[in-house]
């Protein structure tokens, strides 16, 4: 952070000494907005059923990474969908001036949910976006929801309010872009990747892979771009609200 601030001071000094055109000034803005976003594409090619504590110091354990759901119509694995949207979100956010840290950029990894949170913590992320998709028994269920910790979370109560605001912003952003049903924010203190997080976090359940329409939509490249754009808009709105 010190290096970044120092660079910003130098840049400001340079602007005073060498007045620049509007185009050059816009370029310097695009070079960085000072915010770090960590993106976790949920799951991976193969789950890992060995266990880890659900939070720092917890005696309760859960699988390190669940296998995830899959499209009942398309057969697409949740891990493939989350990675595709994560890579789109990475490029959109980078173009908007964010520093983006990816928990993974390929399917062939084995990174536990606790480790993913620790990647976000170590990066000093200002927001940790965990992308997932839903799967339930009923094919009728559809829509977008986001998970956030409660203020009574035993591991990370200090990020409850910011995580709830982040969750609301991204679910609203995606639904505004795609027109999907907005199922709002659900509070949840059982997720390892939330409990291990020390930075504002959300799990975005981008849609139901068990709903034929939503599954087919989410398999479409243009629709994925729309989803990622909406999520990015939500991230912008979150930072606009907390500055
Ligand atoms: Zn998932």
Image: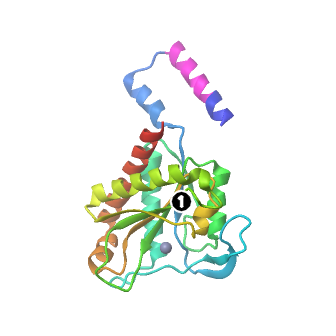
Quarter assignment of residue 151: bottom right
Q: Residues within 10 Å of mark 1 (few under 14, many from 20)?
A: some
Camera-nearest residue between 135 and 161: 161
Quarter assignment of residue 228: bottom left
Dominant secondary structure of the magenta stretch? Answer: helix
Tell me which colouring the rendered structure shows.
Answer: rainbow
State left or right for residue 155 relative to residue 88. right
Is residue 199 visible in the rendered image? The answer is no
Q: Is residue 6 above or below residue 183?
A: above
Q: Please name the residue that numbered disc 1 is placed on.
A: 150
Where is residue 3? Give x, y as percent: 67, 34
Quadrant containing the N terminus is: top right
Q: Is residue 16 magenta-colored?
A: yes
Camera-nearest residue between 230 and 7: 230
Q: What's the residue at 60%, 55% (across, down)?
A: 157
Where is residue 96? Give x, y as percent: 43, 43
Camera-nearest residue between 24 and 36: 36
Quarter assignment of residue 215: bottom left
Q: What's the residue at 73%, 74% (across, down)?
A: 59
- Secondary structure, mark 1, is loop
Is residue 5 visible in the rendered image? The answer is yes
Q: Which residues are magenta?
A: 7-18
State left or right for residue 205 relative to residue 159. left
Where is residue 105? Give x, y as percent: 54, 64
Q: Residue furthest front?
A: 152
Where is residue 175? Give x, y as percent: 31, 59
């Amino acid at each position: 952070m010190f290096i970044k601030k120092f660079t910003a001071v130098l840049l400001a000094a340079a602007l005073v000494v060498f007045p620049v055109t509007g185009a050059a000034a816009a370029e310097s803005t695009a070079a960085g907005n000072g915010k770090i976003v960590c993106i976790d594409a949920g799951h991976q090619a193969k789950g890992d059923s060995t266990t880890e504590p659900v939070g720092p110091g917890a005696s309760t354990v859960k699988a390190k990474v669940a296998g995830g759901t899959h499209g009942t119509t398309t057969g697409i694995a949740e891990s493939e969908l989350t990675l595709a949207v994560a890579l789109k979100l990475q490029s959109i956010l980078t173009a908007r001036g964010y520093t983006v840290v990816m928990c993974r950029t390929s399917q062939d990894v084995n990174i536990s949910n606790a480790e993913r949170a620790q990647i976000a913590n170590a990066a000093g992320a200002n927001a940790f976006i965990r992308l997932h998709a839903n799967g339930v028994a009923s094919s009728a269920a559809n829509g977008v929801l986001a998970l956030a910790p409660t203020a009574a979370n035993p591991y990370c109560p200090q990020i409850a309010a910011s995580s709830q605001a982040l969750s609301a912003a991204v679910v609203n952003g995606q639904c505004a872009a795609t027109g999907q049903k907005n199922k709002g924010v659900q509070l949840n203190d059982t997720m390892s990747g939330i409990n291990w997080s020390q930075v504002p976090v959300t799990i975005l359940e981008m849609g139901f892979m068990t709903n034929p329409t939503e599954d087919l939509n989410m398999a479409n490249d243009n629709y994925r771009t729309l989803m990622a754009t909406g999520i990015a808009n939500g991230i912008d709105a979150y930072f606009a609200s907390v500055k």
